[in-house]
Image (tube, rainbow, N blue to C red):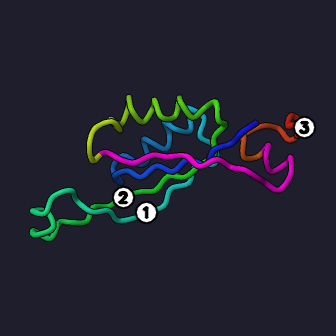
Amino acid sequence: MRLKLMFVILDKAKAEKALRALAEAGLRHPQAMPGTGTAPTALSELMGTGETEKVLLIGTAREEDVPALYSVLKEKFAFEEKNTGIAFTVPVRSVGGPATLALLAGMPAGEVKV
């Protein structure tokens, strides 16, 4: 079994909905952290509104669930449009034993074979 660590950066207003939708599509142990981003135009910066509230979502997913997660972002949150968010995954190469792997994959500990 292969795991991915998924990172999603999006506007704060969409974060709660995105977290729920991604969890339903297979994201395990989702976490949300507040952050600050920048607006895309120089005019916004000139007017003092150059920073926007963002949220960083992080969670684990089985490799086979990743396409569905990207589909959720594309279809429900328009991630193919400019300035809507960023999403990427990083492979998890090692964990501390079969119980940890089962936990991160959302499976009972006895089901994981290494």
User: Is residue 35 shown in magenta?
Assistant: no
Instruction: Read off the residue under disc 3.
Output: 110
Q: Is residue 111 above or below residue 84?
A: above
Q: Mark 1: which amino acid?
A: Pro
Q: Give the CA distance from mark 3 to mark 2.
A: 38 Å
Which residue is pictured at 46% across the width and 49% down the height?
Answer: 8
Image-based side of 46 in relation to 18, left or right: left
> Which one is earlier in the sequence, the residue at label 1 or at label 2?
1
Q: Is residue 50 left or right of residue 79?
A: left
Which type of secondary structure does the marked residue at label 3 adopt? helix
| Magenta highlight range | 84-102
Q: Residues within 10 Å of mark 2 (few under 14, many from 20)?
A: many
Q: Amino acid at mark 3?
A: Gly
Count of residue discs: 3
**Disc 1 and disc 2 in contact, CB within 8 angstroms:** yes
Task: Please tell me the numbered disc located at residue 54.
Answer: 2
* Picture quadrant where residue 54 is located: bottom left
* Residue at disc 1, secondary structure: strand
Residue 81 against residue 15 in the figure, above or below:
above
| Mark 1 to mark 2 CA distance (whole Å) | 6 Å
Q: Is residue 88 magenta?
A: yes
Q: Amino acid at mark 2?
A: Lys
Label 1: which residue?
34
Using the image as rendered, state which of residue 19 and residue 94 is in the foreground: 94
Could you classify mark 3 by the number of other residues whose Cα lies within 10 Å: few (under 14), some (14-19), or many (20 or more)?
A: few
Do the residues bearing badges 3 and 2 touch, measured as CB atoms within 8 Å? Answer: no
